[in-house]
Image (cartoon, rainbow, N blue to C red):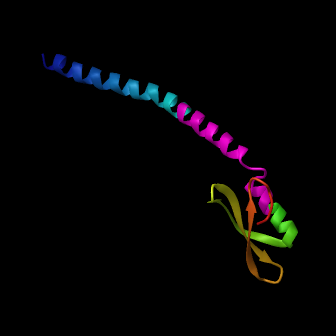
Amino acid sequence: MQMTRLRLPMFLCLALLAGIVASGPIQASERDRHRDQGGERAMADRAISLDEAVARAERRHDARAVRAEEKRRDNRIVYRIRLLGSDGRVFEVTVDAETGQEL
């Protein structure tokens, strides 16, 4: 009798655990699919990547990038790049991600 009472809760716990394990990868792949679609839409708004903007700014100003970040400004995506010049001066440039032009 004692053993029979323990079997039902144990069976329910195992069934619940199996359901959680089985649904985990499905949820993760669904989340990844939505994230990838969002990334594609976001990249469509950009003419150049952050890496390319940094490389262009370094060449144009003969400097080394010390920091670069993506920001939103008035419904536009811009790259803010902090550079260290050969004279030791630190300065910042802003590049429009849609056009690739320095602002």
Q: Where is residue 70 in the image (x, y as percent from the top left)?
A: 66, 59
Query: Relative to residue 65, is residue 15 drawn left or right?
Result: left
User: Going 79% across and 55% down the picture, which residue do you hit?
Assistant: 99
State whether residue 36 is above or below residue 52.
Answer: above
Q: Quadrant of the N terminus?
A: top left
Query: Relative to residue 62, is residue 69 drawn left or right?
Result: left
State whether residue 37 is above or below residue 6.
Answer: below
Question: Residue 81 or 7: which is nearer the viewer?
Answer: 81
Question: Residue 5 or 90: which is nearer the viewer?
Answer: 90
State whether residue 18 is above or below residue 85.
Answer: above
Q: Magenta residues?
A: 30-54
User: Going 59% across and 33% down the picture, which residue do you hit?
Assistant: 33
Query: Relative to residue 30, is residue 14 drawn left or right?
Result: left
Query: Relative to residue 47, is residue 71 drawn left or right?
Result: left
Quadrant of the rendered image containing residue 86: bottom right
Q: In which quarter of the image is the C terminus?
A: bottom right
Q: Position of residue 100 (x, y in %)?
A: 80, 57
User: Going 28% across and 20% down the picture, which residue do you hit?
Assistant: 11
Principal SS element in the magenta part?
Answer: helix
State whether residue 96 is above or below residue 27.
Answer: below
Quadrant of the rendered image containing residue 88: bottom right
User: Going 76% across and 69% down the picture, which residue do you hit?
Assistant: 65
**Number of numbered tags placed on the structure image:** 0
Question: Residue 100 or 4: which is nearer the viewer?
Answer: 100
Q: Where is residue 71 in the image (x, y as percent from the top left)?
A: 64, 60
Question: Residue 98 or 39: which is nearer the viewer?
Answer: 98
Find out whether residue 37 is within the magenta segment: yes
Find out whether residue 2 is within the magenta segment: no
- Of all residues, the one furthest to the front in this rendering is 74
Q: Position of residue 28 (x, y in %)?
A: 52, 34
